[in-house]
Image (cartoon, rainbow, N blue to C red):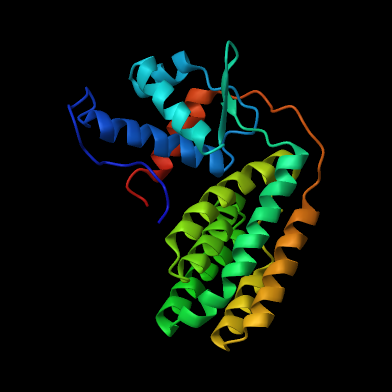
Amino acid sequence: MRKGLSTERSGGRGENGLGTGGRDEAIYRNLFVAIVENHLAPGTKLPEDTLAETYGVSRTSIRKVLQRLAHERLVDVRLNRGAAVAQPSVSEARDIFSARRIIECGAIGKVVAKAVPAAIDELRELVRREHAAADRGDWREAIYLSGAFHVALIRVSGNETLTEFLTQLVSRSSLVIATYGTPMTSSCRHSEHDDVLDLIAAGDVEGARAWMERHLKDVERSVVLVEEEPSALDLRKVLDEVARRHRGER
């Protein structure tokens, strides 16, 4: 399920009606979406005072959220330099794709074994949505759905630990692509995800494993490893727009 704004309530209520835990979760989810959908480019500074004003909370609350995102390697927090959206190095980028190949290729046998028709139908629906987003030129949505497909595919294996690891790697992959790639780098060619689903439906473990190995290497090779300075942006405006887009939609 997509990480969007949350309306969960726990603990004491803040001025916005959300409990402290629910409010922090909502801020986390808003920032998470803004980062993984590349509304905030790698290297973008995340000043605590600006974020506190944007969300109407204390800097202490913002600091907790930033630490959580830093634990997931989506934000860099440095002493006396503040926080910024993580900007993976070339070495980190290669490590991320290497780890993805180990997990996704290694788990494909379990995926094939447990891929009942209903699971394949759900995956095909994700692919349909990915195609529709690409066709209308919504590359952020297409990129998100491409990553979501890979996570959903591994979830079919029934191994939640691997699924959790892959979820983090896919999120970090979006930063790699935003840092070094082009807008459509991580949005797979239209037929590709359909192809692997055909192999899985046919019970072809080796074919599906070979497809995954080749596919992830192709994505890695498509990334242009040239560092660029992030362009200036209005942080508060971007986060407000992300919140409006995802409020009640997902």
- Relative depth, front residue between 60 and 178: 60
The residue at 70%/62% (across/down) is 216
* Residue 174 seen in render: yes
Q: Residue at x 77, y 49 (%)?
A: 223
Q: Position of residue 53 (x, y in %)?
A: 39, 17
Answer left or right for 94 relative to 69: right
Q: Is residue 6 above or below residue 108?
A: above
Spot occupied by residue 164 in the image (x, y as percentages of width and height): 47, 54
Q: How many marks?
A: 0
Nearest the eye: 198 or 247: 198
Residue 94 at what x, y percent from top left?
Answer: 74, 48
**Outermost top residue:** 80
> Which quadrant is the N terminus positioned in?
bottom left
Q: Which residue is most to the left?
A: 12
| Residue found 57% across the figure and 77% down from its top | 109
Residue 184, visible in the rendered structure = no
Q: Is residue 34 above or below residue 59?
A: below
Q: Is residue 209 left or right of residue 73?
A: right
In the drawing, does residue 91 fall left or right of residue 199?
Answer: right
